[in-house]
Amino acid sequence: MDFTSLLSFLLLIFGFGFVIFWHELGHFLAAKWAGVKVEQFAVGFGQALLCWRKGIGTTVGTSAPRMQRAINDARARGELGSEAELRDRLGIGETEYRLNWIPLGGYVKMLGQDDMNPNSQSADPRSYNSKSIGKRMVIVSAGGIMNVILAAILFVFLFLYGFRTPAAVVGWAQSGSPADRAGLQAGDRILRFNGARMHDFNKIRIETALAHPTEPAIVDVQKPDGTIKTLSILPLPEATAGGFLQIGVGPAQLLEAAEGLDKLPAAVELSQPSVRLMRAGDAIAAINGQPLPTATLPAELDANWARFDQAVQASQGRPIQLTLKNTDGSVRDIELQPTFEPAFGAALSGIAGMQPRVVIAYLQEKSAARGKLQPGDVVTRVSANTPSHDAVDNPTRQQFQKVVESASIAGATIDIEVDRQGERVVIDDLPLNVKIESMIGIDRRGLGVGLSDETADAVVAGVLPESGAANAGIRGGVRIVSVAGQPVKSWFELFAGLRAVLPDQPVSIGLQTPAGAETVQFTLDKTQHDLLAKQRFTHNLPLKDRTELRQTSNPLVAMAWGAGETRDLITQFYITLKRMLIQQSISAKNLSGPVGIIDAGVRITSRGPDWLVWYLAIISANLAVVNFLPLPIVDGGLFVFLIIEKIRGKPLSNAVMTATQLVGLALLLSLFVFVTYNDILRLF
């Protein structure tokens, strides 16, 4: 863990502790208001690490022994009275404030109240159980209410300080996606989604994921020319285990080099050679010889981004000439090679079901493959030195990663054979030495290389089942040499040749196989032909994120924004539960536990202090909702018990209360194990 990650981790833990403290402060203040004796105010669980008690001060561990010794000494001096009277006479406070060893929660221990022991009731008039049902309801609900208040306060502070977020501008719309079919294009600004104002791209993702699974969303869009259109878009589940709804759009970027490009950490995943084309301070000044207008206003930035995307799509895979101007005044021309973008719902890239081989894009500084593999090497074979000897000839990117993963799990080395500009190079016993860190202390080892798809040579690495290629009998390992009698070499030439073929019309495909030349008849049905016609191209230039600052100097506006964000968060939580438990349009595998929350928090916090405040506001609002669910153990379950007591005129029996609490504890522990397991699967 580097210093930045460590600092983010410590800030996150401190922030979590504060959110928990604030929650328990609500219970504490309400108990004091109701006249209940509070014995302990604790942040965290387990044994006490540090304690403070009035009249005693700070102690390592609990202050109870020192308090008891002071009371015993007073009695030895002949002082009379109860323990409480002696404590008051000595100026010792009744409440112990504790910081416990396990910083994953907290509690307020009140006289006559114990979640796991209903028999702890006391006859003392200052006990929790002696107070009216109304006062106990206030005490139970105060923690959640305080968390809602904290979330709103954090948002108010955030908007006064300024929150820089991805702009609600479409960077691209995947071919075949709901957004593409509805007419969304690069440079479009999404103003509203089902009536909700879209202040940033994150809100678009959230609103889409929580949209109704069978009803179209109404989306108001502002085009780069200023015109406003209303579109009807039906979100669809993504092609992953998560099952979130999406419309197939990504955020826009600026036509400037990403910040810190000259100081990229070794662990950054760069997937195309084009990342090496730009330097820190570069900006795109012209595309294919056409200068770009100077852009400073949001609409001008959106229009230039639309021009760039149009050039990438019009290229059809041919190189694009870009003129870069640096902040130092230098100007130079580069050639950008676009590549294929997978269609919506397709987890794998490919043309008519045919997938390219994997190529090495870059090597990390500490990779053991450095000096052995080179950028541009085409992998012709990879094998894991494991008992199962997993091996693949001419692997796709996904097949290559699977073999490396199996070797990593077994702690084994790998053998790689590559084609280096026509020369066969074999590297045996290549160790997986690059440590991939995690927040929970479990480490993986990787090869430390970036991967890309080969496009220069039309060698088929894999064939997707039930595709046009599979139906024609094309197999992995063959080279496509012609389409309809016209020679082809690259994947872009293959794409152009197939795109020119009419749907449902057989075309001859020339193959070069290990056994020699072969010709097969290839037929594209209308669906496959339409996919080719709508094929989008992408690039991997390291461009700066297109962000906007959401900020106000008016406290009243900040309060309105903060209240709205808090309301939206709470609403989204309940909608998520509805989608997950009732409609089942969201998988429970998306739930996160402490591991996932910390892992995501460290990554989010590293973006800056504004993102830390934003994340803590979300945690605080979610904590309020979770604690007030009608489940035993948590505040919502206790509130339900109080409602039942009010209706019955007496509380439930101790046996029923104890059994219910035990069942609730078992459910929470099971949920904890489940979400932690999900977190580990996502991380590893």
Image (spheres, rainbow, N blue to C red):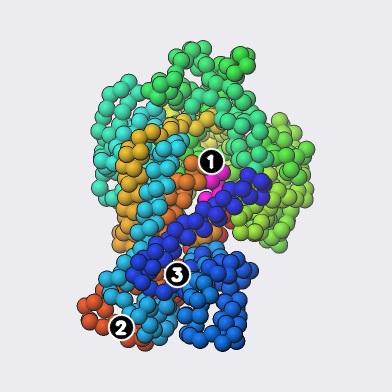
Q: Which residue is identified by label 1?
A: 608
Q: Identity of the amino acid at label 1?
A: Gly
Q: Which residue is identified by label 2?
A: 652
Label whose residue precedes the other's in the sequence (1 or 3): 3
Q: Which residues are magenta?
A: 599-606
Q: Is residue 203 visible?
A: yes
Q: Secondary structure at mark 1?
A: loop
Q: Which mark is residue 435?
A: none
Q: Which residue is identified by label 3?
A: 108
| Coordinates of residue 32 in the picture (x, y in percent) | 38, 68
The mark tally for this picture is: 3
On the picture, is 345 further left or further right than 182? right
Residue placed most toward the observer, 192 or 116? 116
Q: Quadrant of residue 282?
A: top right
| Coordinates of residue 543 in the picture (x, y in percent) | 54, 29
| Coordinates of residue 39 in the picture (x, y in percent) | 47, 74
On the picture, is 122 further left or further right than 316? left
Q: Give the spatial CA distance, label 1 vs label 2.
A: 50 Å
| Coordinates of residue 105 in the picture (x, y in percent) | 49, 65
Report the residue at 35% width, 80% height from top: 125
